[in-house]
Amino acid sequence: MMTERRTLVLTVSPEGEPAERVAQAAALLRAGKLVAFPTETVYGLGADATNATAVEGIFTAKQRPHTDPLIVHIPDADGLSGVARDIPPIAWELTRRFWPGPLTLVLPHANRIPTVVTAGGDTVGVRSPSHPVAQALLRAAGVPVAAPSANRFMRTSPTTAAHVLEDLDGRIDCVLDGGPCGVGVESSVLDLTVTPPRLLRPGAVTLEQLRAILPETLGPDERGGERDTPGSVKRAPGQMPRHYAPRARLVVFDATGAEGAEAVLAAAGAALAAGVPVGALVPDEEAPALERLGVVVARLGPVDNPAEAARRLYAGLRWLDERGRDPLLAHTYPRAGLGLALCDRLRRAAGGRLTAPGAAAWMETGTARDEA
């Protein structure tokens, strides 16, 4: 039996027009309601970050554990001192260079930010999104907005309003539909509360760009400095081994270029020979050979364009899920620039594991290995 939709959908242009609909969504935020909205990265599920009761609703709607902190969104750097304290000079330099944009800074939180936002810790992630709809909403709301991705916990992040409704229709108050997101993967998260600073989550602001300003910045897997340990309070979301995952099992081969293409093709052939309805998520150039075998393929764009792959990644995983493909096959990208973020999201979507090329028994026994 069909259930009646209870989530209000307000459609606006990518520029945020008509302004009356943005104002309506902003009024809902001020009233303690939950509003999903587009950012340049993915759709966020927003609540007034100063209202602990409203923020609690995010955890209920997403079925998200309270140990996973939220990122606070503000329109510009002028609002940073209202949500964070003890702000180092380098933070202001980074906001001048990268805000508004897909960079989250982890800083000590201000007293007005309740601990439900910070997972009980003493830090908060803050960013200023560049999407015009997000900017318009934040300015109209007049409050900082706590917003994780607008999906059920651990599911594939949403890059369209339709993706939001797939997971949260009837569980949230409003979706502000401003079209598809341009970046497609979550923001980079830089922890400025440790020495040296550490990139906790790679994104469209790359490690190379950050090192041009902060040469000592550590990558997510580099040793040195303070790191999260089992049982410690997380400083940023997206740190769990399994995250961003489709319903189907995703097998990601730890190989790039021709080696990666060959690994996916061989695995697809073996799956089809065994009668397994396999899907694949690959660059455009690799799709024809797989499609000739009868594989259902989601294309990620040209092999040398990681930005396009990032835009298509989550939509591709959701599209393959809709078609009942299981398992799904993919391979990694070179770990430089945005490729580092792609590898991170693929690994977590695959349950925190990458598979060695040529692992013949992956279908039956899962010969995957942990990524260091």
Image: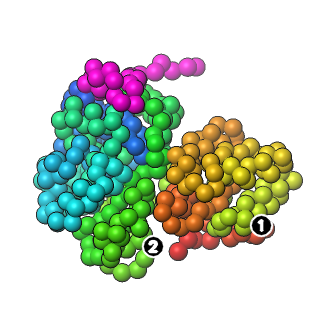
The residues tagged by marks 1 and 2 sit, at their Cα atoms, a distance apart of 28 Å
Residue 351 belongs to the span the image colors magenta: no
State the SS at label 1: loop
Q: Amino acid at mark 1?
A: Ala
Residue furthest right in the image: 273
Relative to 282, 57 lies left or right: left
Query: Label 2: which residue?
Result: 221
Q: Is 20 situated left or right of 183 in this image? A: left
Vertically, is 210 above or below 36? below
Residue 46 appears in the rendering: yes
Please give the residue where the numbered disc 1 appears in the rendered image. Answer: 361
- Horizontal relation, residue 113 to residue 150: left or right: left
Q: Position of residue 359 (x, y in %)?
A: 74, 69
Residue situated in front as seen by the camera: 74 or 251: 74
Labels 1 and 2: the sequence-earlier one: 2
Residue 302 sits above or below residue 174 on the image: below
Give the residues drawn in magenta, as a range: 1-25
Question: Which residue is at 33% across, 49% downward?
Answer: 101
Pinpoint residue 154: horizontal percent, then vertical percent: 48, 50
Q: Residue at x 35, y 66 (%)?
A: 210
